[in-house]
Image: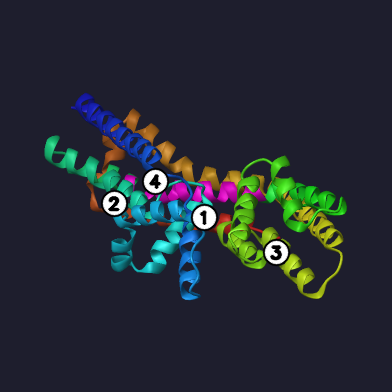
């Protein structure tokens, strides 16, 4: 029986991984990438229609393509059920994580990752417990990956911002305009900061004011350092002054913030390690004891007292991990 259960678990994990790989491959083949520029084209078309102006001919093809996609996209139907704000937040989260996936595609992937293992193990293998476990994994893993990728991309953006501003300052001092300097800096910068500022240039080329394009950038990349940069630019634009000097001071401030954050991470590394140990050691020890003596550790699951003790222990573990996280979280 032990070998049969192990085979069922392995088959379940393989099916789960296969479904995830299939959905990711399918969405990569079907998705046309970031549609924010095309959405802006449709918005500009509506603004020109309100002002009784015709859209330029070069926009017509992109507008028709995007409208055709929207006819088959089920995001509108989802918005009616969950609310438009949920769809907007999810679209923004996918953009922040640099995942070229629509809201409807992401929700469909989550639905399949939940229902596929549940139905297979419930009706094929007659083992609903494993199906429920894998369904819970399928429910939790996608948003966890989404949040982790988004945070990693924002951190990478923050680490690149100071160097990008230095390139911007050098271009401004060479006599270029702000947008020309941004274009020059994007050519010399790595991802993801290059693609984000390229999108800023594209939006301004389509008629959006630079201030509004900066606000869109801040919404796509919720970074305190970027907010400082955008605020400094708006203030300089309104009251005047030397933009190169202002951006240089902002770059120095951001560089000091990044340096201080690195020092804080080093000083709190021991606390973070303690949190991981507190969270994982009981689970690892339980697995070892189960492998050595299943009947001994099985009392925690088969008796009422054991289940109560498991619940109390899990609650205390969670409280301890959250307290350690709170202690080592220092805002700069």
- How is the model colour-coded? rainbow
Report if the CB atoms under discs 1 and 4 are less than 8 Å apart: no
- Assess disc 3: are there few (<14), some (14-19) or many (≥20) residues with their C-alpha within 10 Å of its C-alpha: some
Q: In terms of secondary structure, where does tag 4 sit?
A: helix
The numbered disc on residue 141 is 4
- Assess disc 1: are there few (<14), some (14-19) or many (≥20) residues with their C-alpha within 10 Å of its C-alpha: some
| Residue that badge 3 annotates | 230
Left or right relative to 270: residue 279: left
Q: CA distance from mark 2 to mark 1?
A: 54 Å
**Most foreground residue, 30 or 110:** 30
- Assess disc 2: are there few (<14), some (14-19) or many (≥20) residues with their C-alpha within 10 Å of its C-alpha: some
Say above or below: 187 vs 36: above
Q: In terms of secondary structure, where does tag 2 sit?
A: helix
Tell me, yes or no, whether the highlighted magenta stretch contains residue 64.
Answer: no
At x 60% / y 54%, what residue is drawn? 202
Earlier in the chain: of badge 2 and badge 3, it is 3
| Residue that badge 1 annotates | 37
**Between tags 3 and 4, which lies in front?**
3
| Residue that badge 2 annotates | 307
**Between tags 2 and 1, which lies in front?**
1
Earlier in the chain: of badge 3 and badge 4, it is 4
- The magenta region covers 138-157
Earlier in the chain: of badge 2 and badge 4, it is 4
Q: CA distance from mark 2 to mark 3?
A: 54 Å
Left or right relative to 23: residue 262: right
Report if the CB atoms under discs 2 and 4 are less than 8 Å apart: no
């Amino acid at each position: 029986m032990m070998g049969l259960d192990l085979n069922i678990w392995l088959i379940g994990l393989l099916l789960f991984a296969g479904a995830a790989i299939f959905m990711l491959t399918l969405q990569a083949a079907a998705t046309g990438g970031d549609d924010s520029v095309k959405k802006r084209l449709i918005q500009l078309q509506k603004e020109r229609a309100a002002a009784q102006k015709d859209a330029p001919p070069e926009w017509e093809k992109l507008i028709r393509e995007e409208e055709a996609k929207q006819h088959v996209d089920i995001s509108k139907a989802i918005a009616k059920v969950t609310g438009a704000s949920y769809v907007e937040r999810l679209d923004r989260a996918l953009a922040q994580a640099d995942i070229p996936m629509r809201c409807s595609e992401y929700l469909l992937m989550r639905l399949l990752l939940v229902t596929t293992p549940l139905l297979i193990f419930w009706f094929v293998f007659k083992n609903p417990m494993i199906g429920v476990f894998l369904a819970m994994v399928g429910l939790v893993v996608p948003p966890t990956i989404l949040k982790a990728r988004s945070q990693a991309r924002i951190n990478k953006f923050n680490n690149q911002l100071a160097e990008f501003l230095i390139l911007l300052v050098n271009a401004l001092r060479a006599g270029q305009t702000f947008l020309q300097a941004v274009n020059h800096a994007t050519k010399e910068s790595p991802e993801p900061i290059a693609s984000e500022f390229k999108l800023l240039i594209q939006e301004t080329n389509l008629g959006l004011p630079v201030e509004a394009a900066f606000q869109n950038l801040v919404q796509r990349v919720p970074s305190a350092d970027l907010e400082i940069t955008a605020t400094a630019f708006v203030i300089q634009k309104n009251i005047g002054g030397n933009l190169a000097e202002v951006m240089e001071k902002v770059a120095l401030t951001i560089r000091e913030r990044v340096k201080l954050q690195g020092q804080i991470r080093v000083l709190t590394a021991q606390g973070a390690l303690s949190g991981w140990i507190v969270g994982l050691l009981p689970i690892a020890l339980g697995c070892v004891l189960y492998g050595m003596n299943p009947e001994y550790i099985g009392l925690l699951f088969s008796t009422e007292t054991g289940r109560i003790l498991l619940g109390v222990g899990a609650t205390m573990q969670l409280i301890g991990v959250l307290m350690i996280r709170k202690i080592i979280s220092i805002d700069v």
